Image (tube, coloured by chain):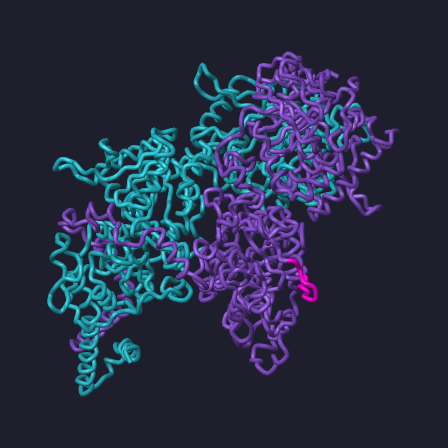
């Protein structure tokens, strides 16, 4: 049996060797050699003489890289101008900054020519610019020029294609080789390669184009815009579809796509592969072959089955019920799906390699979208599954913020484009990336006001700072010159009694000059009188004299006590981005008349705080005066009683939140003091008695005088006109009032901090 | 073939006994062949590894002079010039990086060689001190791999930091012969000083085909956005000089220029500025009459005054960084280190790490044309912002400039973020200095949404065995119009909940959840049964709250969905005598907490409480059976930075007869325990996140002289 043993031994040996060799590679890695292996990770050696190594540049070389024989800076810049043209344009070489110096950033649109119709979309773009605060009708003032020729669709197979653009452009005396021109384009190139070519020489013009590819995009010069449909609203725009922050995201599907599959040609690679990730459960990826006339010619074996599946699902339903949406390239890089997904709070998963994302100069897309790679499609399902619910929640909210801030209307898209260009003109007065990507968004932040986060009402928490501990009282005086009315004297006394009051500013809105300084009451805080321009919108002018973040806006006949002021200010410090005030009114939708209604009756809700007695952040003065287009301010000045509604609408449009009402004693205006007012035109405010909406008797129905009812209907008109201007009704209603913690509690007044608020 | 013979062999033993002797020879031969084959294969597999490891790496004590010499034949291939159209999706082989759970790219470093041309003359310095530091840093980082087959990114050990220190053509040849070069795909080169006389190109002139370039002086025309990485020019002074951080604030000079080799044209413009604005502007130059032995690099002069460099930079608010022949200047690093705000005057320059760093927060960029306006531009910047820029500048230096390691890791992280964008580091992480990260909050529910009323809320009642009182609470709560579901958390393991038939009949679904352990944290568990955003946490003895009060509370929560909106308000106070926090439940004019015995909040905070509570607070609360409500207040305030909202005047909750503010015992031990909790939590959070406010929310018409029947919420109790 020796031989047998030998055989067994041999076999054993052989098997062992086999095991070692086949499985050995793994074993070597993991189990028995792992200890030694870790030791022997072959790191970069610690050279014995590493301290003796020479530096990459010797000490003298670094600070002295000049070379006197070089071109002088001026010569170099001149040389650039001729070298870096066309596809290598940059702001330094192709843009004439000097045009923008004298008049600032003004945009001129070429007059529309007869017999040269523009598409609906281009018409919207032009009217967006014409409505903007940058528009000028004078080409001499202009810094930026917009053609009246429709350049949106440059696919020469399209019906909207405009021919002979080159010739037309050359005939424009202002063209100047395209310098300082901005050209909008949505579609360029055509079948089969859909190249970026526009079919005419854009010269040195800036291109704002959809579906920009990174290669032809001139960084810091061009602007990538999103593709939008011709139904995209001019202004306002629908809000996003996210109504609640569900945790975990309770959506039926994880990832969806429904769209065309190109059987041939550019873009077909990605779309043809999309069906691979479909699992019929939480990942729905449906494609149809049906597109174009002759799809059946190119039809492949999957087409029939795909087409059947495709019909089973509804696109809108998928969009509403999915956490992630695939946004693959179409024939061109951008697609409508991008904005659709953004609005639907369906986090876009981008599969469009080489796409310069919309407004990428400003927007940090990493916070709102998953930028996938076309080459790694099959990794997408596991990648999105690994994204933590917290991050999903943040992504979803960011899509809604971006949609609302920059994309929901043509106005917003165009204004964002303009602001991005404007920011380049003076880099030191431009928005940081943070400002673009945090609520309320770059369009609502004016870098001319400040570039410091702490100067705005929106960023205290992110910035880790708090609003100023004092306020500026800002009183608008309209009483007859010569002497000061009793109410204003009492008001100054009450306000200056507040420990938080830093200064009092009186806006003198009357023809007569203000009383000499000796006639003003002595106050512990400085008192400044400014002569106004006698426009209603003047009360929201960003006067230099206002030094604190918080403004307490007052009418001269407002009656407030010191403790009311103190309490309201302590509330404002908790809500610095809102208007915090005393008397309130509300708006409602009147279905019978099909318009917005306005009421100053006592109601259970409020949406407007009268600026006759309210705290708000001084930045809103700047927004009011500089952000709103001049036309809107003219409207307000014409209407006599609308400026405070506009202020409320503006703040609500910025914050999306209602104002805050705080406790007040019964009357806020002194009815006794019926002062004669300077009733000349727009400057006059209506008699105070009728303006005290908190008193139940001031309900419009009961006001006998025609002045009262006219005023009421004017305010209602104003509300409707504003809703029209904004494209929606920004006002938001609230059902609460903030009172001191022990307000009217049955406890000794000695315990209360604000006992006087309870006195009738 | 191997697999087949193996199968045959394993069947061997069973067959052998029946074998005839003449077959034995056949088998022995077969075995021998197999054995030999196996041994040969084995040798083949192991041999090369051992050679490499012994000759190249394992010997630690080596000098750079001992590295192998590679001779480059004159006709060895040269890569194509860099391709300006390269982008990640065209020139980068992403398949090498794969999907991995850690979302980290793997970086391989080629071993060090000395390259010589045909005549034996060396191509460059073998390696500079900085490049060695950089490679060491990569090798020590978690990006590193020593397995060339698993690598996603390759870093050649050929030092191209300074183009002037190398021979261009031969360096290119050396690159081309790297074992995985493959047209430079996925290769990363680090260069700080590109170009050379006379035209000083802004990117490395060494032909490099598709390789990525981390370059220190890119202009907008050579930088391939999203492909290259713009890096700083390292200043060796960073390592030599220790400049302690200086508090922000006004400094002796307003504008300082310290560069020595300025173009005369720039110098004239600067001097004009100085002439106009006097002593607040200081234009330094090199010193002409220094005694021997004083390093010229460390001194700067203005007329006869001698200043220490870089210390003098700390004396100025703004420091000018002008371009020289190259765009990237090492002085930028010195300026940042000194906490001086750089004024960058270099048209078309791509600032270091501009892909992720927000330079507008740390610097002022002024177009060359506008140099004469520099003073007025800088004057227009508010002081508060200047102070922030100073801090920001210093932070950028500390995080991304101070060492070759910092530069290397930031570069790799940027590339990593491109490959795994869904795991990328956020803007805030890159840009916020630690102090800001610490003091700022980023609210997870940042979007201003007012949730639809129709959603309703889920009431969660935590109970142990007070069935009678529980049923009363259920009946009361079920009267609230917006209640959509009621969840009873049965925290008693020894007793079964009452039978179904005994529970009150209510109009909304009622669910009972039984818990495994009697823990307070059970009340904050994010149960799947909670389908609404709003949760009303309510104790099983809170019987006094009216339906109007609860409905109003829900309406208030809708207006403040990211806050705790509750009924019993409490306050924390600083006890100056004891030097610690104190809990207060007396009649106070302020609130900083609401008790979760009756409070609305967002379900998201249940997740936070259960999974993200800092430190050991959660276990501590469960162990002490107390203060879960205070912990929740801390958590929410800490993550949102906002105060609570106390709704309605109600202060009695348990029984009308109770004299105390509420039934919870007001005895001393209770108060001491609660105070202990506050102190404990404040120390775990490292801060006191609670915010004190003086207001509470009441219905608009509360206590107003107005017909009660017209009020939305008439039944608001007074106490």
Left or right: where B416 falls relative to A725: left
Write down which chain is painted purple.
A
What's the magenta bit mostly, secondary-structure-wise?
Answer: loop
- Residue drawn at the location 17% of the way across and 69% of the way down: B72
Query: Where is residue B455 drawn, in percent x and y?
Result: 68, 45
Task: Residue A465: tell me if it is visible.
Answer: yes
> Residue A757 at x, y = what percent?
69, 18
Looking at the image, which residue is at 23% across and 84% down? Answer: B19
Residue shown at the point (65%, 18%) measured from the top left: A492
Question: Where residue B306 appears, x then y in whole percent?
Answer: 22, 32
**Who's the residue at 76% across and 25% down the image?**
A678
Within the magenta stretch, is there residue B367? no
Q: Nearer the viewer, residue B427 or B520?
A: B427
Which contiguous range is marked in magenta? A111-120
From the viewer's side, name the closer residue of A44 and B135: B135
Q: Residue furthest bottom?
A: B22
Residue A710 locus on image (x, y percent): 83, 35
Query: Foreground: A160 or A301?
Result: A160
Quarter of the rendering occupied by the N terminus of chain B: bottom left
Q: Quadrant of residue A219?
A: bottom left
Q: Name the image quarter holding the C terminus of chain B.
A: top right
Answer whether residue A115 is magenta in the image: yes
Q: Which chain is cyan?
A: B
Q: Quadrant of residue A577?
A: top right
């Amino acid at each position: 049996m020796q031989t047998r043993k030998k055989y067994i031994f041999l076999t054993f040996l052989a098997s062992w060797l086999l095991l070692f060799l086949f499985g050995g590679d793994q074993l070597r890695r993991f189990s028995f050699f792992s200890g030694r292996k870790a030791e022997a990770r072959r790191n970069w050696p610690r050279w014995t003489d590493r301290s003796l190594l020479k530096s990459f540049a010797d000490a003298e070389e670094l600070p002295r890289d000049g070379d006197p024989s070089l071109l002088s800076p001026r010569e170099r810049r001149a040389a650039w101008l001729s070298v870096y043209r066309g596809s290598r344009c940059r702001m330094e070489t192709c843009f004439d900054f000097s045009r923008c110096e004298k008049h600032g950033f003004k945009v001129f649109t070429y007059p529309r020519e007869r017999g040269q119709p523009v598409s609906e979309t281009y018409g919207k773009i032009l009217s967006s610019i014409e409505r903007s605060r940058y528009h000028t009708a004078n080409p001499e003032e202009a810094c930026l020029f917009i053609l009246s020729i429709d350049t949106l669709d440059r696919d020469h197979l399209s019906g909207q294609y405009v021919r002979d653009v080159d010739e037309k452009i050359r005939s424009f005396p202002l063209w100047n080789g395209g310098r300082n021109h901005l050209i909008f384009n949505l579609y360029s190139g055509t079948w089969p390669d859909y190249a970026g070519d526009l079919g005419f020489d854009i010269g040195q013009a800036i291109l704002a184009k959809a579906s920009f590819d990174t290669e032809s995009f001139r960084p810091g010069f061009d602007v990538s815009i999103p593709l939008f449909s011709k139904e995209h609203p001019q202004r306002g725009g629908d809000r996003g579809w996210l109504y609640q922050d569900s945790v975990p995201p309770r959506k039926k599907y994880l990832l969806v796509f429904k769209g065309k599959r190109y059987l041939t040609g550019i873009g077909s690679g990605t779309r043809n592969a999309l069906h691979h990730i479909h699992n019929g459960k939480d990942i729905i990826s449906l494609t149809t072959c049906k597109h174009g006339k002759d799809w059946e010619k190119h039809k492949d074996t999957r087409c029939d089955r795909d087409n059947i599946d495709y019909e089973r699902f509804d696109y809108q339903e998928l969009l509403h019920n999915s956490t992630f949406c695939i946004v693959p390239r179409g024939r061109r890089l951008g697609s409508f799906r991008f904005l659709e997904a953004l609005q639907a709070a369906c986090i876009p998963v981008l599969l469009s390699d080489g796409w310069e994302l919309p407004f990428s100069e400003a927007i940090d897309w990493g916070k709102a979208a998953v930028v996938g790679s076309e080459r790694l499609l099959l990794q997408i399902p596991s990648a999105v599954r690994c994204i933590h619910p917290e991050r999903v929640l943040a992504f979803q909210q960011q899509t809604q913020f971006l949609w609302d801030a920059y994309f929901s209307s043509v106005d917003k898209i165009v204004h964002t484009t303009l602001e991005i260009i404007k920011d380049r003109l003076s880099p030191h007065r431009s928005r940081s990336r943070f400002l673009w990507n945090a609520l309320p968004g770059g369009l609502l932040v004016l870098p001319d006001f400040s570039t410091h986060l702490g100067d705005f009402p929106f960023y205290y928490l992110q910035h880790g700072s708090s609003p100023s501990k004092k306020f500026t009282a800002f009183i608008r005086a309209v009483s007859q010159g010569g002497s000061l009315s009793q109410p204003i004297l009492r008001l100054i006394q009450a306000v200056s009694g507040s420990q938080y009051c830093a200064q009092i500013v009186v806006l003198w809105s009357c023809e007569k000059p203000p009383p000499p300084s000796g006639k003003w009451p002595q106050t512990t805080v400085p008192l400044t009188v400014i002569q106004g321009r006698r426009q209603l919108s003047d009360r929201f002018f960003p006067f230099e004299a206002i030094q604190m973040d918080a403004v307490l806006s007052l009418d001269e006949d407002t009656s407030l006590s010191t403790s009311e002021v103190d309490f309201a200010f302590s509330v404002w410090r908790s809500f610095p981005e809102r208007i915090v005030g005393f008397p309130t009114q509300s708006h409602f939708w009147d279905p019978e008349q099909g318009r917005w209604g306005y009421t100053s009756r006592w109601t259970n809700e409020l949406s407007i705080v009268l600026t006759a007695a309210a705290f708000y952040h001084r930045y809103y003065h700047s927004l009011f005066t500089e952000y709103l287009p001049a036309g809107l301010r003219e409207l307000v000045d014409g209407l006599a009683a609308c400026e405070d509604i506009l202020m409320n609408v503006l703040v609500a449009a910025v914050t999306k939140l209602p104002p805050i009402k705080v406790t007040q004693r019964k009357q806020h205006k002194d009815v006794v003091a019926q002062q004669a007012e300077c009733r000349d035109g727009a400057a006059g405010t209506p008699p105070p008695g009728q303006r005290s909406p908190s008193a139940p008797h001031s309900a419009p129905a009961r006001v006998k005088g025609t002045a009262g009812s006219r005023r009421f209907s004017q305010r209602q008109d104003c509300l409707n006109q504003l809703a029209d201007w904004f494209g929606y009704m920004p006002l938001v209603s609230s059902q609460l009032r903030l009172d001191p913690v022990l307000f009217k509690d049955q406890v000794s007044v000695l315990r209360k901090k604000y006992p006087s608020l309870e006195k009738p | 073939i191997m697999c087949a013979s193996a199968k045959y062999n394993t069947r061997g033993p069973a067959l052998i006994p029946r074998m005839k002797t003449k077959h034995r020879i056949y088998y022995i031969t077969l075995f021998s062949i197999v054995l030999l084959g196996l041994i040969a294969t084995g040798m083949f597999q192991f041999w090369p590894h051992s050679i490499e490891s012994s000759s190249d790496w394992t010997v630690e004590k080596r000098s750079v002079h001992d590295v192998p010499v590679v001779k480059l034949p004159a006709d060895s291939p040269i890569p194509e010039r860099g391709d300006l159209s390269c982008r990640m999706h065209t020139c980068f082989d992403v398949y090498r990086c794969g999907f991995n759970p850690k979302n980290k790219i793997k970086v391989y470093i080629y071993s060090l060689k000395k390259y010589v041309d045909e005549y034996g003359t060396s191509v460059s310095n073998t390696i500079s001190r900085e490049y060695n530091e950089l490679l060491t840093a990569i090798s020590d980082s978690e990006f590193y791999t020593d397995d060339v087959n698993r690598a996603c990114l390759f870093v050649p050990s050929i030092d191209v930091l300074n183009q002037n220190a190398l021979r261009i053509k031969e360096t290119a040849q050396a690159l081309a012969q790297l074992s995985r070069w493959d047209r430079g795909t996925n290769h990363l080169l680090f260069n700080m000083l590109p170009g050379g006389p006379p035209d000083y190109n802004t990117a490395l002139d060494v032909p490099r085909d598709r390789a990525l370039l981390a370059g220190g002086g890119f202009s907008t025309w050579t930088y391939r956005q999203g492909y290259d990485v713009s890096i700083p020019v390292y200043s060796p002074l960073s390592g030599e000089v220790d400049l302690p951080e200086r508090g922000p604030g006004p400094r002796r000079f307003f504008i300082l220029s310290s560069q020595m080799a300025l173009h005369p044209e720039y110098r004239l413009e600067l001097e004009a500025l100085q002439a106009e604005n006097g002593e607040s502007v200081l234009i330094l130059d090199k010193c002409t009459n220094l005694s021997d032995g004083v390093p010229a690099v460390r001194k700067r002069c203005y007329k006869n005054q001698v200043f220490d460099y870089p210390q003098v930079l700390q004396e100025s608010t703004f420091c000018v960084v002008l371009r020289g022949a190259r765009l990237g200047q090492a002085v930028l690093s010195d300026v940042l280190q000194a906490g001086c705000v750089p004024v960058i005057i270099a048209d078309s320059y791509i600032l270091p790490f501009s892909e992720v760093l927000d330079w507008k927060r740390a610097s002022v960029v002024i177009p060359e044309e506008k140099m004469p306006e520099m003073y007025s531009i800088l004057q227009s910047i508010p002081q508060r912002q200047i102070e922030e820029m100073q801090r920001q500048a210093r932070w950028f230096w500390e995080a991304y400039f101070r060492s070759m390691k910092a530069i290397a890791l930031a570069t790799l992280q940027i590339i990593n973020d491109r490959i795994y964008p869904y795991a990328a580091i956020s803007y805030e992480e890159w840009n916020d200095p630690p102090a800001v990260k610490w003091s700022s909050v980023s609210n997870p529910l940042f979007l201003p949404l007012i949730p639809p009323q129709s959603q309703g809320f889920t009431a969660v009642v935590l109970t142990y065995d007070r069935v009678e009182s529980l049923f009363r609470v259920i009946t009361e709560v079920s009267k609230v119009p917006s209640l959509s579901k009621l969840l009873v958390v049965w925290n008693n393991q020894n007793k079964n909940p009452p039978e179904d038939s005994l529970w009150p009949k209510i109009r909304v679904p009622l669910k009972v959840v039984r818990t495994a352990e009697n823990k307070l944290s059970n009340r904050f568990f994010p149960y799947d049964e909670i389908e609404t955003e709003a949760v009303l946490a309510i104790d099983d003895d809170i019987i006094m709250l009216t339906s109007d009060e609860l409905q109003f509370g829900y309406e208030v929560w809708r207006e403040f969905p990211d806050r705790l909106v509750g009924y019993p308000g409490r306050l924390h106070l600083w006890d100056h005598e004891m030097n610690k926090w104190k809990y207060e439940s007396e009649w106070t004019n302020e609130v900083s907490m609401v008790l979760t015995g009756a409070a609305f909040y967002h379900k998201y905070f249940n997740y936070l409480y259960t999974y993200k509570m800092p430190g050991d607070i959660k276990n501590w609360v469960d162990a002490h059976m107390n203060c879960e409500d205070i912990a929740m207040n801390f958590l929410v305030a800490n993550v949102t930075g906002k105060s609570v909202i106390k709704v309605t005047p109600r202060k009695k909750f348990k029984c009308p007869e109770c004299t105390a503010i509420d039934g919870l015992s007001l005895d001393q031990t209770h108060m001491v325990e609660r105070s202990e909790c506050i102190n404990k939590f404040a120390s775990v959070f490292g801060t006191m996140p609670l915010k004190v406010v003086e207001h509470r929310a009441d219905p608009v018409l509360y206590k107003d002289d107005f017909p009660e029947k017209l009020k939305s919420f008439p039944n608001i109790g007074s106490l």
